[in-house]
């Protein structure tokens, strides 16, 4: 193990990094922030740019120091991990920075992650982008990419993973690279695409099962609600609240709305709930809201791997998007390589209001065995999904509450409309995978083609090109 010399032994000698830090600290100690008024606007801009470069360099140096400390086992004798050791010697440094630096430092010896670590360390060289490089990779972004790589490498093809990591690295580098939020969306999307569908759907089902709403006492007589939602639930709530949460000037005086943003959102949620519980039976129970989801047509039809992404960055699994698309307003679009809209078709609502009223009268409640939730709480479900050639007519439809709609899609249950003593009713086959067996039988009999978009069936939405195909998904589904 290497032993660093005592400071007294290195007097007058150049110490890598340490000498520069000592010199920088001496300079900054003499600086007077209270005198910034003396700087011109151009000088303030230059100072801000320089501080940004110093901050990036500092983070990169922290990665190097933590990697070296880890290799020497510093702090391990006291039972400390690398972050604990770093925090003990730099207590004012944000824990988030130390944790991200530790993640990158741990990857320093991994060959497949060497480009990511090298890009992060490039920030230690101030002005590296001006030397003709692609630009440094901020440490927080590097940590996101490293975590993505480690979480998926046991499931993905190594070469495919290496290519995906390289693409993320290229897109995140430099001042013009993706933001941390955009990197987060990109890695979640890439992980869902590369992992087996069964694992992605299982994880989504686990998250869905852990939704919760807890009420507790707040300060000054207020009540505190703690809401825990999966990505689908969060996307629906965001779409509903954002549509009602815009500040409105006073109708009489025209004065600006003084409420802070968090109050807008709380009032918007109360408004949405109040509309839902106060509307009479048989009329829409909430304001129309639109949930935008972007997904390739091939992924929606199940012909290729993929995932849906909302404007707020929630990543939805293919099966979740298919369930939402059962009874939604669809707007086919053709997007370019940069996401620009090249062509847009007309909006099509798969089940119209007259059909849904018919379903309310026929089914009377959720059709899943044992469930009696009223029709106002249900979605209109395609027994054979339109992406598989199913028509949007009453004989191919059934009412399902939100919970059982998820169950039917996740367990791939098949249903059919049969004639009963009191008229048509829905019969369910609760064998896991019975829907897939139904599709195989229908295809074998050549009754249903593989894809309505490829065979021009009238019941399917107009087919966009193989590029991205955003679908407007209406959370107010199943209501006339």
Image (tube, rainbow, N blue to C red):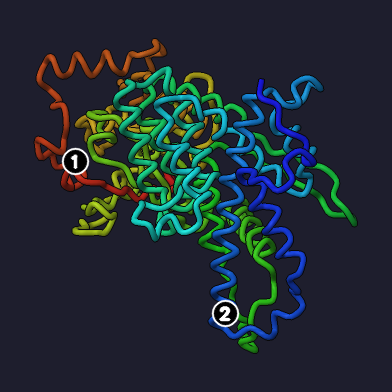
Which residue is found at the position 34% from the left and 47% from the top?
A: 294
Give the answer, above or below, for where 27 lies relative to 14.
below
Give the answer, above or below, for where 99 lies relative to 448.
below
- In this rendering, position of residue 272 left or right of residue 161: right
**For residue 29, which quarter of the picture?**
bottom right
Which residue is found at the position 25% from the left and 16% from the top?
A: 438
Q: Nearest the camera: 327 or 214?
A: 214
**Given this view, does label 2 or label 1 mark the residue nearer the observer?**
2
- Position of the N terminus, as image quadrant, is top right
Q: Marks 2 and 1, how far apart in space?
A: 64 Å
Label 2: element kind: helix
Spot occupied by residue 119 in the image (x, y as percentages of width and height): 44, 43
Residue 361 visible in rendering: no
Identify the disc placed on residue 104.
none
Give the answer, above or below, for where 384 lies relative to 88.
above
Spot occupied by residue 202 in the image (x, y as percentages of width and height): 47, 21
Picture mark count: 2
Residue 182 visible in rendering: yes
Mark 1 neighbour density, 10 Å: few (under 14) some (14–19) many (20 or more): some
Residue extending furthest right?
220
The mark that comes first in sequence, 2 or 1, is 2
Spot occupied by residue 127 in the image (x, y as percentages of width and height): 46, 59
Residue underneath mark 1: 459
- In this rendering, position of residue 301 left or right of residue 66: left
**For residue 34, which quarter of the picture?**
bottom right
Residue underneath mark 2: 43
Q: Nearest the camera: 338 or 374?
A: 338
Residue extending furthest top?
431
**For residue 193, which quarter of the picture?**
top left
- In this rendering, position of residue 163 left or right of residue 401: left
Which residue is found at the position 54% from the left and 74% from the top?
A: 46
Label 1: element kind: loop
């Amino acid at each position: 193990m290497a032993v660093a010399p005592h400071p007294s032994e290195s007097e007058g000698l150049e110490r890598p990094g340490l000498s520069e830090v000592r010199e920088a600290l001496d300079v900054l100690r003499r600086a007077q922030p209270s005198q910034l008024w003396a700087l011109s606007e151009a000088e303030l801009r230059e100072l801000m740019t320089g501080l940004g470069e110093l901050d990036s360099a500092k983070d990169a140096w922290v990665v190097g120091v933590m990697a070296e400390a880890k290799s020497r086992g510093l702090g391990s004798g006291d039972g400390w991990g690398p972050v604990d050791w770093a925090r003990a010697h730099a207590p004012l440094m944000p824990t988030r920075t130390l944790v991200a630096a530790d993640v990158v430092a741990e990857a320093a010896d991994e060959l497949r992650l060497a480009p990511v670590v090298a890009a992060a360390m490039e920030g230690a060289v101030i002005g590296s982008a001006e030397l003709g490089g692609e630009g440094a990779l901020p440490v927080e972004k590097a940590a996101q990419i490293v975590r993505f790589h480690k979480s998926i490498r046991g499931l993905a093809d190594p070469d495919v993973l290496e290519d995906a990591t390289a693409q993320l690295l290229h897109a995140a580098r430099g001042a013009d690279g993706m933001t941390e939020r955009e990197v987060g969306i990109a890695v979640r999307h890439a992980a869902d695409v590369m992992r087996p569908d069964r694992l992605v759907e299982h994880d989504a089902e686990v998250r869905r099962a852990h939704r919760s709403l807890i009420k507790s006492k707040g300060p000054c007589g207020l009540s505190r609600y703690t809401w825990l939602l999966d990505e689908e639930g969060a996307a629906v709530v965001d779409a509903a609240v954002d549509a009602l949460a815009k500040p409105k000037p006073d109708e009489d005086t025209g004065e600006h709305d003084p409420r802070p943003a968090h109050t807008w959102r709380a009032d918007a949620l109360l408004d949405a709930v109040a509309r839902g519980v106060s509307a009479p039976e048989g009329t829409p129970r909430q304001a129309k809201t639109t949930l935008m989801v972007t997904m390739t047509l091939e992924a929606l039809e199940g012909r290729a791997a993929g995932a849906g992404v909302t404007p707020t960055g929630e990543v939805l699994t293919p099966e979740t998007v298919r369930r939402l698309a059962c009874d939604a307003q669809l707007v086919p679009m053709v997007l370019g390589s940069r996401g620009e809209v090249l062509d847009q078709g007309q909006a099509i609502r798969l089940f119209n209001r007259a059909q849904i009223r018919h379903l309310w009268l026929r089914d009377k409640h959720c059709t899943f065995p044992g469930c009696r939730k009223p029709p106002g709480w249900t979605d209109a479900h395609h027994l054979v999904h339109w992406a598989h050639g199913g028509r949007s007519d009453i004989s191919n439809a059934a009412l399902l509450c939100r919970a059982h709609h998820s169950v039917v899609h996740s367990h791939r249950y098949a249903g059919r409309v049969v004639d009963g003593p009191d008229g048509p009713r829905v019969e369910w086959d609760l064998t896991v995978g019975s829907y897939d067996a139904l599709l195989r039988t229908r295809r074998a009999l050549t009754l249903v083609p593989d894809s309505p978009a490829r065979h021009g069936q009238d019941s399917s939405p107009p087919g966009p090109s193989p590029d991205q195909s955003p679908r407007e998904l209406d959370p107010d589904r199943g209501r006339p």
